[in-house]
Amino acid sequence: PVRPWLEPLNMLLFTIILTVAPSDPPAPTQQLRSDPPAVAPLSCRTPPPPCRAAAASDHLSAKTFSPQRGQGLTLDLRLAAVAITWIAAIVAVQTTTPSCMVWLADARAAYPQLAGTASAFGIYAASDALSQVVTHRGGVDLRRRSGAADSGMGQESRLRGGSDSAPATLDVRRMLRSASCSALLSGWFAVHYFRALDSLVRLPGWAAAAPGAAGVLYACLPALGKVLFDIAVYEPVYDAVYLSLQGLLRGERLAPRELLSAVLAVWRRAPYYWAPADIINFSLVSTRLRPLYNAVASIPWSMHLSQSANA
């Protein structure tokens, strides 16, 4: 049982404590130099170091979104592989006829201009993509070679990444412009061009009937005449029309002197490459496949021009 005298005693003690205690807090005393410094509020404190999990997460996010050395080269190789596979597929469609696809040979024979134009469009689009990759990688090599003359952080940053680690940016408009111009000139027009050459440059009957070594020599004359005409006449005309069409599609107009200078620069190099290529084309390749052979042979030629222009 609760004793009845405890409750009045508790009330008395509580009244004494309230009476003795001061009503106002004491004034702050001056802090001595020996006293410990005051603790800053929580908002002004230096944040604690992150834990290992947070640090690993930040490193992983930086690794994911920042380009790494070699990543751009890998993407460029993938793009080049896709372009080469596309070219190989077009060549296979134009040159082979599986037993289950006899209709394909009939379609090629019935519509040679359409087949040549479509093949040229696809091949030259892939060729331009390859040229862009080669130009980009050539620029990366030039930056690395020029970085060897630098010193300090400039060279280190250049070799670590930056533009070197970025993949080639595919210019789709340029690719479509090149494919469209080449489809017209090296596709549709080339079909008529090679047919006209075969009908105009022919061996006379008396030369074809010549016996022995003379007959073999005479048999080589038509191919040599076609090669000569192709390099001396058709090549500069083709280059001039091609560059003019490219300028029109870009909304530009080349000055006659600038156009002549560009054509002469390309024409000066043409015989070293196109003379052997044309000898093979006019002596070993059938008339139907000559536009296709010409398109495939233009791939290393265009890459060489792009590499030389950006060297």
Image: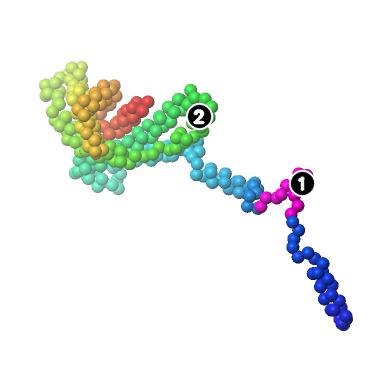
Identity of the amino acid at label 2? Gly
User: Which residue lies under the disc numbered 1?
Assistant: 32
Placement of the C terminus among the 4 image quadrants:
top left
The quarter of the image holding the N terminus is bottom right
Quarter holding residue 187: top left
Of the pair 274 and 226, the residue shown nearer to us: 274
Q: Residue at x 24, y 38 (%)?
A: 251
**In front of the other: label 2 or label 1?**
1
Q: Which mark is residue 91?
A: none
C-alpha distance separating marks 2 and 1: 53 Å
249 above or below 153? below
The answer to whether residue 31 is magenta is yes
| Residue under the image location 30 percent in, 44 percent down | 98
Q: Position of residue 53 (x, y in %)?
A: 62, 49
Task: Say if residue 96 shows up in the picture.
Answer: no
What amino acid type is highlighted by mark number 1? Leu
Q: What is the number of callouts on the image?
A: 2
Q: Which residue bears the numbered disc 2?
A: 154
Name the residue rendered at 60%, 46% in the picture: 56
> In the picture, residue 172 is in which quadrant?
top left
Extent of the magenta region: 28-41
Q: Is residue 131 magenta?
A: no
Q: Is residue 55 visible?
A: yes
Residue located 76% across and 58% down the image? 26
Relative to 114, 91 lies left or right: right
- For this orientation, the residue located farthest to the top is 213
Measuring from the top left, give residue 202's x and y in whole percent: 14, 26
Q: Could you tell me residue 145's position as x and y percent?
A: 46, 25
